[in-house]
Image: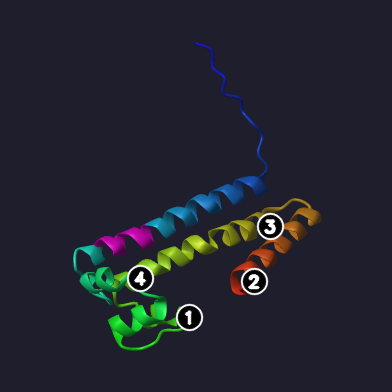
Amino acid sequence: MKDNNKNAAVDKMGLFFGKAMVIFTIAGIIVMVVPAIAYFLGYKQFIPHDEVVRYWANPVAKFWMLTKGAPVHGYGWIFDNLGYSDSVSMIGVMLLLVTPLFAMIAAAIKASGGIFRFLFFVSAIEFIVSVVFKMN
């Protein structure tokens, strides 16, 4: 049987980008899944599972009024309620969101030439802007 695998040379910048993507993706999945399992087992639920199921089809503002009796704006509620398994799970989602940014920064640090470093930083800024600012 013929071996069709060929060794490809990959520079440090590419390796750092790939390793950062793998590390932060695995970390994000773990931080998302482990608390989610605890949530579904009934451990420290910010919003009890039966209420989530009952009110899930509602618009966001109505969902929060029905489940917590108060409006929620933004994502500050996650950090205010880190003692609950469902809130901690959302940290994993956020980590997955910023994984490409961390990978771009890691690659920029290891970039061998100034142009590569510049392009990665421009890409990182573009990523931040696209996440932070809502475009209509």
The C terminus - image quarter: bottom right
Q: Disc 2 to disc 3, how far (Cα)?
A: 27 Å
> Which residue is located at x 53 percent, y 52 percent?
21
Residue pointed to by mark 4 = 88
Single out the mark in the foreground, 2 or 3: 2
Whether tag 4 and tag 1 are in contact, CB under 8 A, the answer is: no
Number of other residues with Cα within 10 Å of mark 4, as a class: few under 14, some 14 to 19, many 20 or more: many
Sequence order check, earlier mark of 4 and 2: 4
Residue pointed to by mark 1 = 74
Which residues fall within the magenta stretch?
Answer: 30-37
Where on the picture, by quarter, is residue 124?
bottom right
Compare residues 90 and 9 and report the one nearer the observer. Answer: 90
Residue extending furthest toward the top: 1
Q: Disc 3 to disc 1, how far (Cα)?
A: 31 Å
Q: Disc 4 to disc 3, how far (Cα)?
A: 30 Å
Where on the picture, by quarter, is residue 90?
bottom left
> Which residue is located at x 41 percent, y 64 percent?
92
Q: Disc 2 residue type?
A: Met
Sequence order check, earlier mark of 1 and 2: 1
